[in-house]
Every structure is written in structure tokens, then in C-alpha cells.
Amino acid sequence: MEDLINKIKTHLHLSSEAEEFIYSISKEKTLPKGEILIHQGQVVKKTFFVTAGCLRSYCIDKNGKEHTLLFAIKDWWISDYIAIHTDELATLTVECLTESKVIEFNAKELDKIHARFPEFESYQRHNLERHVVSLHKRILNQLQLTAPERYDLFLEQYPDIEQHTRNFHIASYLGITQQSLSRIRVEKVKK
Amino acid sequence: MEDLINKIKTHLHLSSEAEEFIYSISKEKTLPKGEILIHQGQVVKKTFFVTAGCLRSYCIDKNGKEHTLLFAIKDWWISDYIAIHTDELATLTVECLTESKVIEFNAKELDKIHARFPEFESYQRHNLERHVVSLHKRILNQLQLTAPERYDLFLEQYPDIEQHTRNFHIASYLGITQQSLSRIRVEKVKK
DNA sequence: AGAAAAATTTACCCTATGGTAAGAAAGCTA
DNA sequence: TAGCTTTCTTACCATAGGGTAAATTTTTCT
């Protein structure tokens, strides 16, 4: 819980009322590896702030193949924002890749923070702007880089994540098969 | 100019002061086809609201190939938000695909609207949330769909855009070559 | 309209990545 | 630690899409 409060405080003066509000609507949880927090096809009400461990969100396509949208480690948020903001059922699944600690919020309740404490508006706007930038970059990288280049970039961007993930998770993030990633890794070692 | 004001008014009560502010910091422009609004490698200061015509933003990779990030038609915003929000030089180029009308803003000045008229905060937050959702969907589509499927979806999402764009623009958005798109189009006609 | 430029199509072959399957390695559980 | 399960690697062949180039069509310019 401290982690979230501290993170906010680096960007914002947090009144004791606002801090109290955050406490009142959140629940800290420790989750085992493999736990599913959001199930594809179900209603999505929750959003999670990660304080330890590693989670990922992914969709399953018509052939049963998984495609990873996001890995979330300490200090990241994770949920199915497609579902939350379009009021549809989950297209994503969110699972714990390792034992993890999260702070759970009801997304609709959390949203009220902006009305009650307007100083959160611009904080949240900045978060969203940064997120948009990272998504723009990811799309451009997917368009212009080869699979080995994307893998190298991934390792730069998530330097410690291989402790937490299996290779097939990374492959499904990069848009290649597990076998291709395995070949790419072999080539890297040769050099 | 009316278009922008009207668009905002569908989401927000717009005070006459705020309307006045928007007028005071904006400039309406008619641009010929081929005009470049943002040049890769230069400082980005401006952002554009499109009221007529069609523009696109794209990057050029190390082999000289173009990759389209976004097409913008009536009522869309376009700029290089990577550059604006990271204070770096433009990685993108923004060009007019047809003669177009835009409302030009200095991005930093426009940003002040949130401090001066706080009601814009939540409006902008919602815009960003919707944009994030569309980017999440695009990434998932790129991961799970074949090129012909992505093309079909593109035609659904931008039903009238083929009037404005060349096929190689669309190919560079879908992440395929012009030649592949040509083959896909031939196959579609056969069915 | 006619010439020039640009875009599209088509054909050829090539390469990166996919699919399947089997064996090896690693990780988990009792 | 043994046995079971999952993941990773390797090998094979298959295929989607890429690269080059030339012919054709469309668009632009004067």
C-alpha cells in the first residue's frame, strides 16, 4: 500500500483525505502463481496496482493461441481497460505469472477520485499521456523491427523480467511462436 | 473552427471564456495535398485538429521504408505525441494526403487550457482513455489477425478512407508491402 | 489533352516465420 | 528423490509475405 501512496506522492501533493479515500476503497492481496484475476468473457469491475511479482494480460484468439498485451511488474497498473472503458465483457485474461502482491480497486469507485479530489485529474492525464506514448512506440516497433530486433528491445525494456516469465509468454508478446523465439535465442548466443 | 467547438460542446459545457481562449490560441489553415506539417527530426510544437481532408503520421525506418501510425480525418487530432510528451525531436512525419483544413495549436499553449478551465481535464482524460482502448485493440489485432483479416477490419473502421489514400499508405499501416496488399485485394475480388 | 510521374499489378524467386512432432531439459509435487 | 508435467529445443517441411523488376494503370502537371 505504501508503494502506491509513495508513487502518487512523487507526482502530487496527497491530502490526508485523499489518502484516506484510497485506503477506504482498496484491498491489498497476496496472490499465488497461476491465479486468474480477470477472466475473458466475464464482467470486469476491478483494476490492480502491482506492488510485487509479475502479471500479464492476454487474449486468446479463435485458434486458441494466446497473445500478450502487457506484462505488469512493481508499480504498474493492470486490468482489461478495453472492457472497462467500453462497458463490454472482458476480451482479456489477467493472470499472475509469479506469486504477486496487488492493491485491488473497483474501477468505478476509483474513478470517483477525480471528482472528489480534482488534483488527480492532471496526474491521471499525465499517466495516460505517457501510456499513449508507449503504445505508439510499440506499434511503430512492431511495424518496423524484425523479430530478433524486437526481442533485443524487449530485453532492454524489461531487463529483469525473464526471472518471472516463460519464453512462450515473451514470444506471445513479440508476435512470434515459441519455436521462433527459441531459434532467435540460439542465434544470439552464437554471436 | 465551428467543428471543434461543436465537438467539444457535445461532451462539455463550454463557457464563453473558454471558447474565447480556444479562438485566441488557434489558427485555421487550408493545406494543399502533400504539405508536410511535422518533419521527422525537427522540434514539434504544434498539434492539429482536422476539419476536412485526410492526413497521416508515419515514421521512416533505417531502410527508408515508411510505417503509418495513424490516419486522421474530420474531427481527429494529429501530431507527433511521442515527441510532444517526451520533449524529443520528431520521430514522425505528418503529411496531408489530400487538400485539408486543420485548426493549428501550439501544443504547450493548448495544454494550459487544463489549468485555466479545469472542466477540460476530465474531457481530455476521457479522450485519452478512448485512445488507449483503440491502441490496445490495434496491438491485439496486429498480434492475432492475418494480413487479409487486418485489411477487412481496416475497411470497416475507415469505410471512406480509400477515397483519400493510396494503397501503399494502407499497406504501411497494416504492416505489409504494397505488393502483398495488391495480392490480397485480388483474392478478395475472386470471392 | 498530352506528357511525365507515380502508383499498382503481376511474376519471379527468396526468406522469415509457422506448424507439427519428437526428444531433452527444467520445474513441480508427492 | 522419483515421477510427472510443463517448457524448451531441434528438425522437418509448409506458407505467408518480402524483394526486385517490368508491364500496366492511374494520377498529376503543364
Image (tube, coloured by chain):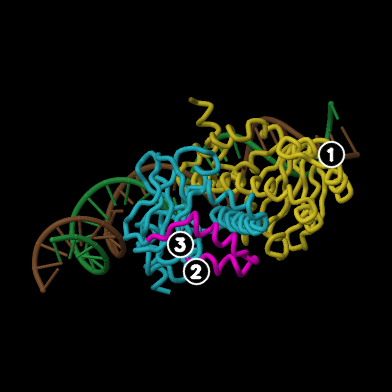
Chain colours: A yellow, B cyan, C brown, D green
Residue B8, how many percent across, how many down? 58, 65
Which residue lies under the disc numbered 2?
B2
Q: Mark 2 lies on which chain?
A: B
Secondary structure that dominates the magenta span = helix
How many angstroms separate mark 3 from mark 1 (CA)?
44 Å
- Chain assignment, label 3: B
Residue B160 spot, x, y in % from top left? 44, 71
Residue B13 drawn in magenta = yes
Distance from the alpha carbon under mark 2 to that under mark 1:
47 Å
Residue B6, percent from left and from top: 55, 69
Q: What stretch is highlighted in magenta?
A: B1-29
Q: Are marks 3 and 1 in contact (CB under 8 Å)?
A: no
Is A52 magenta? The answer is: no
3 or 2: tag closer to the N-terminus: 2
Q: SS of the residue at dot 2?
A: helix
- For label 1, the crowd category at 10 Å Cα-Cα, with few meaning under 14, some 14 to 19 and many 20 or more, is some
Q: Is residue A64 visible?
A: no
Number of callouts in the render? Answer: 3
Whether residue A54 sits left or right of residue B7 in the image: it is right
Q: Mark 3 points at which residue?
A: B50
Q: Which of marks 3 and 2 is in front?
A: 2
Query: What residue is shown with label 1?
Result: A1
Nearer to us in this view, A161 or B122: B122
Q: What residue type is labelled 3?
A: Val
Which quadrant of the figure contains the C terminus of chain B? bottom left
Indicate the chain on which mark 1 is placed.
A
Considering only vertical position in the picture, is D27 above or below A20?
A: below
What is the spatial separation of the Cα atoms under label 3 and label 2, in whole angstroms? Answer: 12 Å
Question: What amino acid does circle 2 point to?
Answer: Glu
Q: Is residue B107 left or right of residue A178?
A: left
Count residues near mark 2 (Cα–Cα under 10 Å), then give few for <14, some for 14-19, many for 20+. Answer: few
Q: Are tags 2 and 1 found on a single chain?
A: no
